[in-house]
Amino acid sequence: ERTVLNIIYTINWLFIFWISISQVTQAPMYQDLQEGDRVTITCKSNDEYSYFHWYRQGPRMPLSYLLSITSSQNVTKEGLTAEYLDTGQRSCLHLSSSLLQDSGTYFCGVIAQQFRKSETHNQNLTDSEA
């Protein structure tokens, strides 16, 4: 009697991460505002699937972390909203209504994540016992 054994072996999703050097641009470079104005700052990376980290340095203040965005779901924190766009090549930081304490220099930091999906392998083996 021949029995067919279905052997399935799977290498589950294997993500291999490494940090690469990205080219990052941010716009606008400078902007004058009135209190209550809406502000949008754009950060672009030449790599897909980037993680964007936003910071602000106020006048005579240390650099402070604002928020991070790593997927297509918007992140909102303390009047700021970050968007993740263009397959992670661009992020926009929106300030809905600017206040005097929002003055400062805004920085975008980028970590480019590279990943590769492994394959799933299926193999049928035949057992030839009689």
Image (spheres, grey):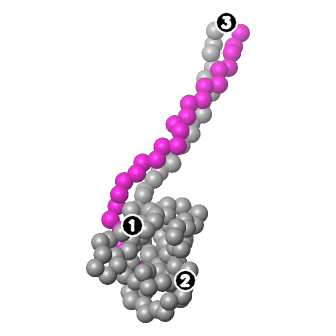
Q: Nearer the viewer, residue 18 or 95?
A: 95
Q: Position of residue 21 (x, y in %)?
A: 32, 65
Q: Amino acid at mark 2?
A: Ser
Compared across the picture, whether 66 is left or right of 79 comes to: left
Q: Is residue 86 visible?
A: no
Chain-order first, disc 2 or disc 1: 1
* Residue to which mark 2 is pinned: 97
* Residue to which mark 3 is pinned: 130
Residue at horizontal 39 percent and vertical 62 percent from the top: 111
Residue at horizontal 46 percent and vertical 92 percent from the top: 33
* Residue to which mark 1 is pinned: 65
Determine the secondary structure under disc 2: loop
Q: Which mark is residue 119?
A: none
Q: Is residue 130 visible?
A: yes
Determine the secondary structure under disc 1: strand
Q: Amino acid at mark 1?
A: Tyr
Magenta segment range? 1-27
Residue at horizontal 46 percent and vertical 64 percent from the top: 68
Distance from label 2 to label 1 (Cα)?
Answer: 19 Å
Q: Nearer the viewer, residue 61 or 42?
A: 61
Mark 2, Cα crowd under 10 Å, few <14 / some 14-19 / many 20+, is some
Q: Position of residue 42 (x, y in %)?
A: 47, 79
